[in-house]
Image: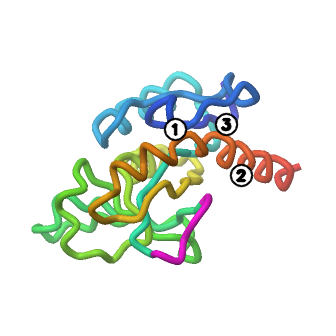
Amino acid sequence: MQELLIICAIEEEFRSKKYAGITHYSGIGKLNAISATYRLISEHKPKTIINVGTVGACNYKLHGVVDCGFFYERDNTFDKIDRTIIVDPKKAKCGTGDSFLLLRDIKYDVVDMEAYAIARACRDNNVEFLCYKYVTDYVGKNSREEWNDNLKDSSKYLEKRLDDYFKDAV
């Protein structure tokens, strides 16, 4: 049993020697994220999972590390199924999808490709879920280039946020 796990999509988003023993990589996208999260919950029985990674911001006032608390599955908005998970209504709204091409109705603060799926697996298994995302770009025509340029800074800022979490938890 491991009390706390950190899940990130890919190592390029978060590399940390300090947190290496509790960090796991799911792969990119919702299917990889939910599959890895269910497997990790089954194997380790954590009380808490923290998702870290990078996001594109739709809210241009946001920068640095953002604490997310609302999670939306944004790919299949045509049906009436509730695709919202609220962990903390005072925190940022994160829209999760497998593509960034379908951002028709931007009601999110940030967008990513895994957080909703990890939040869903945690909710289904009664595991506390926290989510810290580093803003690498602002949704628009240069997002991919900005993401690539700013990716190098994500690990140090996410590690600092985790340090603050552990300091406050003591």
Decide whether residue 106 is among the magenta residues.
no
Label 3 to label 1: alpha-carbon separation: 19 Å
Pointer 2: what residue? 161
In the image, residue 90 sits, relative to residue 111, either above or below, namely: below
Q: Which comes before the other along the chain, label 1 or label 2? A: 1
> Which residue does the image show at 67% across and 24% down from the upper left?
20
Label for residue 13?
1
For residue 84, side relative to residue 91 (left or right): left
Quadrant placement of the N terminus:
top right
Label 1 to label 2: alpha-carbon separation: 14 Å
Pointer 3: what residue? 4
Q: Secondary structure at mark 3?
A: strand
> Which residue occupies the foreground of this view, 100 or 132?
100
Label for residue 78?
none
**Residue type for callout 3:** Leu
| Disc 1 packing (10 Å; few <14; some 14–19; many ≥20) | many
**Residue type for callout 2:** Arg
